[in-house]
Amino acid sequence: MRTVDWIVFAAFLIYVVWDGMRRRDTARDLEGYFAGGRRIPWWAAGLSIMATQASAITILGTTGQGHEFGMDFVQTYFGLPFAMVLLCIFLVPLYRSRAILTPYEYLEERFGPLTRTLATLIFLLSRCLALGVVIYAPSVALSAMIGLETWQSVAIIGTLTTLYTVVGGVSAVIWTDVKQMTVILLGLALILFVLLRDLLPIYSPGQLLDLAGAAGKLNALEVEPEYGGLWPRTLAAAAAGGGTPSFWEEKYNVWSGLFGGLFLHLSYFGCDHSQAQRLLTSRDATQSRLSLLLSAFAKVPMQVVVLAIGVLMWLFYAVHGQPMLYKTLHVERAATVELQPQVQALEQRFAAALAERTAQMQRLAALPAGPTGDPAALRDYQAAVRAVVAVRREARTLVGGATDLQGRPKDDPDTNDIFCRFILDQMPPIVLGLIVAAIFAAAMSSIDSVLNALSGVTVVDLYRRWLRPRCSEAHALRVGKVLTLAWGLLATAMALFFAGGGSVVERINEIGSFFYGSLLGVFTLALTVPRAGGTAAVAGLLAGMATVLCVRFTLKVEFLWFNVIGCVAVVAVGWLVASMRRRTA
Amino acid sequence: MSTSPSPSADSPPPLGSWPRVYALVCLSAVAVMALLWWFTAHHNLRPGPP
C-alpha cells in the first residue's frame, strides 16, 4: 500500500475507535450497556443488523465465490425475507412484551432454568467458534497486503474492536456499525465502478453477459437440481465413488436456499443473541420490526451486487490474464527450489490454457447470434474455461501442502485471496486505502456485536442467574465489561486456532448450522406445543443436536439442510416426550 | 429481570397495517427471485460434461 492509502486506512480505524468510545455515557447501567437504553432508532438498528451479517467474509469470501463458482451462493439468502416476516409476526411481540435483555430469559419463563442454560451454552459455544473465523478472515487480507504474520493481524483487529466494545457497549456497537456499513457500501460501489470502467470499453454489456453466462457464472437461480437422487448417499459410499449423488448434496439451489435458508435465518436473526439483541434496543415493537424488514428488502439485492463484483473480477482476469496462484503462501512455496521444475511446467501449461481461453472468448464474443449461435464455439470456450480451472487446481494442490485423510495431496482453495490480489494490483491510490478500511469495517462490525452479545448472555443468563442473583446493577455492569474483554481475548485465540485454508464464508455457516436448527427448534416448540414442558424441551434440544451430528458424520447432506433437520428433530422429540408425559400423568 | 419494561405504546405501522407491510415484503422477494430466474434462464449456460 502507498502512504496515502495508509493515511486513509489509519484515519478510519482511529475514527471508529474514537466514535465507539465516546458512547460510554449511554452505557451507565445494564440496560444501557446491553440494550442501548432502548432508544436506538430503527434505521440504525437495521443497518447494524446488516453490518453484523456483512462481515469481512461478505467482501472477501463472497466475491471469491462469485469469481470461482458464479452467482449460485445468492440462493442461500432466498429464505431471508420470509424469515424476517415470520420473526416480526411471532418473535418480536414475544420479546417486546417482556422486559428481557436476552432471548434465553424467555426460555426460562416457558420451560424452566435448565432449558435456558442449555440454550445459553449452545449460543456461547457456537458464537465463540464462529467469531474466531470472523476475526481470521480479514487478518488474511492484512497479512497478504502488508506482510504481517497472521497472528499479528489477528491481534490488531481483536484488540481495537474489543477496546471500543468494552467501553461503549451496544450503543458503540450499533453506531460504529452504521459508519462501517456506509464504508462497506462505498467500497463496493468503487470496485464496481473500477471494474465496469475497465471492461465496458472492451466488450458491450450484452457481450459481457454472454461470456460470463457461457462460462456458467450467471447461475443465480437454479430450479432444476443438478443431481437426480432422492435419498442421500452415505459418506462411505460417496468417498468410494459409489451410489447416486442426491438432491441433498447439492450445495446451493433454490430449494436449499428457500427452506434451509429460511430455517438458518429464522434462527440467526431470532434466536442468536448477536442479532436478536438489536430487537431489544429499539423504542417499541414497531421499531424492532422495521429494523428487521430493512434486511428483508436489501439483503438479496446486496448479495447479488457482491457476487456480480466477483463475476466481473473473473471477466477482468479473463480479458487481461490472471495469476495462476492468488494466495501469498502459495506464491512463496512455488518459488522454492525443490518445486521449481514442476511449477515451471505448470506455468507453461497455464499460459497455453490462458491463451486458448482468450482466443475462444474473442471467437464467442464475435458471434452475432450470441453463444448459442455456434454450439462448437460454445463447447470450445467452455472446454478452455475448464482447462484454466484444472491447471489452477493442480498448481494449488502442488504448492498448498494440504492432504486428505489418507495423506494424499489435495486442493488448497484460494477463494478468499482472489479479492485481495485484485485490489492490491488494480485499485488506484486512496481507493485502495478505503477498500482495505471497508474490509476492516466489515470485520469489526461483526466482531463487536458478537462480543457484546457473548458478554450480555454470560452476565444475564449465567452470572446473575446462577452465581450472584442479588448482585447490584453497578456490579453486574462491571462484570459485563470484564467479560467483554475476556471474550475478546478468547475469540482472538480462537482466530489463531482457525488459521487454516478453505472457504471461510462456508465454514461460518457450517459452524452455525450445527447448532442453529436446534436453537430454533426449542423456540418453535415453545410457540407450537403448549403442553411441552422443561423435560420435553431439554430432550428435544439434545436430540436435535445429536441428530445433526449423526447426519453430518454418516450421510452426504449439505450444511444448509442441517438447520431444517435440527429444528424438526427438536420439535418432533419435544412433542413426543410431552405426549408421553401427559399420558403417564 | 429487573430492567424496565418497554416504555411506550407501539407507534403505528407504515402503510396502515402490518399485514400490508408483510405482503409488500413477500411480493418484493418473489419479484426479485422471478427476476433472477429470468436472468439465469436467459443468460446462464450450464457447462456440459468435459
Image (tube, coloured by chain):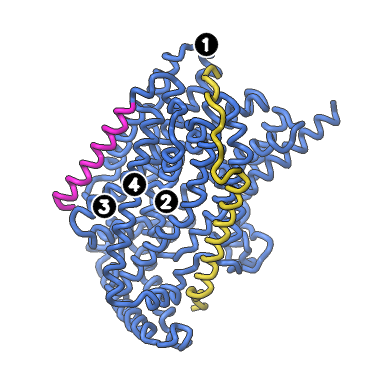
Chain colours: A blue, B yellow
Q: Amino acid at mark 2?
A: Val
Q: Is residue A285 visible?
A: yes
Which quadrant of the figure has residue A569?
top right
> Which residue was labeled with disc 2?
A504
Q: Is residue A496 visible?
A: no
Distance between the alpha carbons at the discs numbered 1 and 2 = 42 Å
Mark in the foreground, 4 or 2: 4
Mark 2 burial class by Cα count in 10 Å: few <14, some 14-19, many 20+: many
Q: Main secondary structure of the magenta part?
A: helix
Which chain does the residue under circle 4 lie in? Answer: A
Q: Amino acid at mark 1?
A: Arg
> Which residue was labeled with disc 3?
A144
Asked if both marks, 1 and 3, belong to the same chain, the answer given is yes
Q: Residue at x 36, y 71 (%)?
A: A391
> Which residue was labeled with disc 1?
A470
Which chain does the residue under circle 1 lie in? Answer: A
Q: Residue at x 42, y 19 (%)?
A: A29
Q: Is residue A261 above or below residue A446?
A: below
| Magenta stretch bounds | A1-23
Q: Which label number is shown at residue A182?
A: 4
Say whether disc 2 or disc 3 marks the residue closer to the N-terminus: 3
Distance between the alpha carbons at the discs numbered 2 and 3 = 16 Å
Asked if both marks, 1 and 4, belong to the same chain, the answer given is yes
Front residue of A214 and A27: A27
